[in-house]
Image (tube, helix red, strand yellow):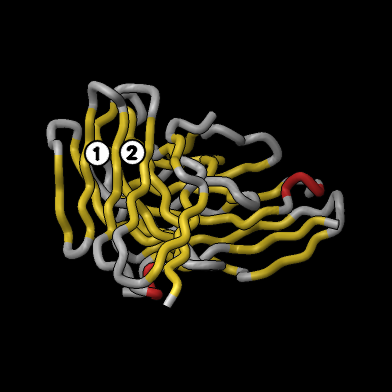
């Protein structure tokens, strides 16, 4: 079963706009991670936020985590056409060791 | 470092055939895993390993076998291919323990006819 559910399934914006993707999960976690997948390629790690953190930044990425609501959001600011990709959240549950459980992803299209 | 490598990139099998998907990493990572990704879906865990000689089942293990004789290699065997195993297969590795990112290979696109 999928631990994470992402919203929206698809998002289309113009270059320069911000993109926000949301992820909800079901069990207690050690951390939550976001990955990007360009069409036909492997996944690339973007950012990891630990369960005791509430917000984290990396370049144009901002991730928030609300463990009381079991939800996270990924914000990409000033989007570029090169940001077009699928974005997945993945949770490392407290009892899972190193295993990650992935959501179904958000397909982001950034139009030039 | 080559990172995580997978071979082959593409494969077509007939129902009932067997094959092995190869995965290797050169980062001395203890943890390795296999996922499958079906169209429009996220990744589902097939099998994983926390070190040489140790493997365990993930969410969708049926029809697949793994072994881990070395730290570097983690092959995935399809015993008798079925059309339901048509998918893209990804191998990943990471350090063991909490709070480590996973590194993914480029994937193997498998079609079973």
Using residue B68 as the reference point, say whether residue B95 is left or right of it: left
Residue under disc 2 on the same chain as residue under disc 1: no
Determine crowd level at label 1: few under 14, some 14-19, many 20+ residues with C-alpha closer than 10 A. Answer: few
Q: Are marks 2 and 1 in contact (CB under 8 Å)?
A: yes
Alpha carbon distance from label 2 to label 1? 6 Å
Circle 1 SS class: loop
Determine crowd level at label 2: few under 14, some 14-19, many 20+ residues with C-alpha closer than 10 A. Answer: many
Choose between A2 and A93: the one closer to the eye: A2
Determine which quarter of the picture holds residue B50. Answer: top left
Q: Residue at x 53, y 46 (%)?
A: B42
Look at the picture and state if A111 lies above or below A42. Answer: below
Q: Position of residue A9 (x, y in %)?
A: 51, 47
Residue B28 at least partly seen: no
Residue B22 at least partly seen: yes
Q: Which residue is mark 2?
A: A98
Using residue B85 as the reference point, say whether residue B100 is left or right of it: left
Q: Position of residue A92 (x, y in %)?
A: 33, 35
Q: Which residue is mark 1?
A: B97
- Chain of the residue under the numbered disc 2 shown in the image: A
Q: Position of residue A91 (x, y in %)?
A: 35, 37
How many badges with numbers are in the image? 2
Using residue A77 as the reference point, say whether residue A4 is left or right of it: right
Q: Position of residue A3 (x, y in %)?
A: 44, 31
Q: Residue at x 36, y 58 (%)?
A: B103
Q: Residue at x 36, y 41 (%)?
A: A22
């Amino acid at each position: 079963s999928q631990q994470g559910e992402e919203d929206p399934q698809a998002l289309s914006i113009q270059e320069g706009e911000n993109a926000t993707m949301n992820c909800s999960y079901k069990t207690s976690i050690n951390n939550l991670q976001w990955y990007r997948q360009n069409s036909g390629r492997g996944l690339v790690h973007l950012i990891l936020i630990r369960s005791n953190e509430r917000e984290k930044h990396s370049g144009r990425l901002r991730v928030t985590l609300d463990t009381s609501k079991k939800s996270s959001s990924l914000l990409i600011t000033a989007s570029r056409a090169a940001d077009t990709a699928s974005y997945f959240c993945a949770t490392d549950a407290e009892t899972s060791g190193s295993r990650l459980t992935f959501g179904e992803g958000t397909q982001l299209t950034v139009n030039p | 470092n080559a990172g995580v490598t997978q071979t082959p990139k593409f494969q077509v099998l007939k129902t009932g055939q067997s094959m092995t998907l190869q995965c290797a990493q050169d980062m001395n990572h203890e943890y390795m895993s296999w996922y499958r990704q079906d169209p429009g879906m996220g990744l589902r865990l097939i099998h994983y390993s926390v070190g040489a000689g140790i493997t365990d089942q993930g969410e969708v293990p049926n029809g697949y076998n793994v072994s881990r004789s070395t730290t570097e290699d983690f092959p995935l065997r399809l015993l008798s291919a079925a059309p339901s195993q048509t998918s893209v297969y990804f191998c990943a590795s990471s350090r063991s323990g909490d709070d480590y990112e996973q590194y993914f290979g480029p994937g193997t696109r498998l079609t079973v006819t």
